[in-house]
Image: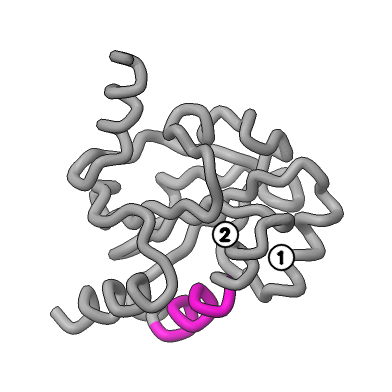
Amino acid sequence: LLAKIEQLKKTSVGATIGAIKMPNNINETISLDTINAKYILIDFWASWCPPCRTESVTLNKLYTSYNNKGFEIYGISLDTNKERWLKALKQDSRVWTNVSTLEGFKTSISKEYGITSLPTNILINSEKKIIAINIHGEELKQFIDNLYKE
């Protein structure tokens, strides 16, 4: 129970995201710490997850609208099949940073942050503090729109 409480604290608004380092599609390790952006959406997804694939449309719109204003996406795939992952990246035009260990839910980051369902996302600011968690679709779009109205 105490371990679960500690895990929940890690993904609460106001908590700071720790170091995340994972390989991309050409096996280069990409650290979340190297992404300098005003806001970063950490997007846990998989090619076999229909809601994740549908959400790609919203993510593409947000990325196109706000990338030049300091918005980034760090996509963490919980796939286990590299070919399916790469095909989904291409089909869904996921042009932002995408990483995967191809270990599915056994990925250490998935375990560390208690990721048990997809899609899951965590929105952080430039100090790596969580400002929102698990907002999707129109709610996500409105939240990001409001951040850039300030």
What is the quadrant of the C terminus in the image?
bottom left
**Residue type at numbered disc 2:** Thr
Q: Residue at x 55, y 70 (%)?
A: 55
Residue 104 relative to residue 59: left or right: right
Q: Quadrant of residue 29?
A: top right
Give the magenta range: 56-65
Residue 86: name its quadrant.
bottom right
Image position, residue 91 (x, y; %):
75, 74
Dot label at residue 136: none
From what the image shows, is residue 62 above or below residue 12?
below
Q: Answer with left or right where residue 136 lies relative to residue 10.
A: right
Type of amino acid under label 1: Leu
Helix, strand or loop status at disc 2: strand
Between the C-alphas of marks 1 and 2, the distance is 10 Å
Q: Is residue 65 left or right of residue 22?
A: left
Residue at x 43%, y 54% (from the top left corner): 121
Colouring chosen for the image of the structure: one colour
Within the image, what quadrant is residue 123 found in? bottom left
Determine which residue is flagged by label 1: 89
Quadrant where the image shows the N terminus? top left
Residue beneath label 2, please?
A: 97
Check the image and report above or below for 52 versus 10: below
Q: On the rendered structure, is 108 left or right of 145?
A: right
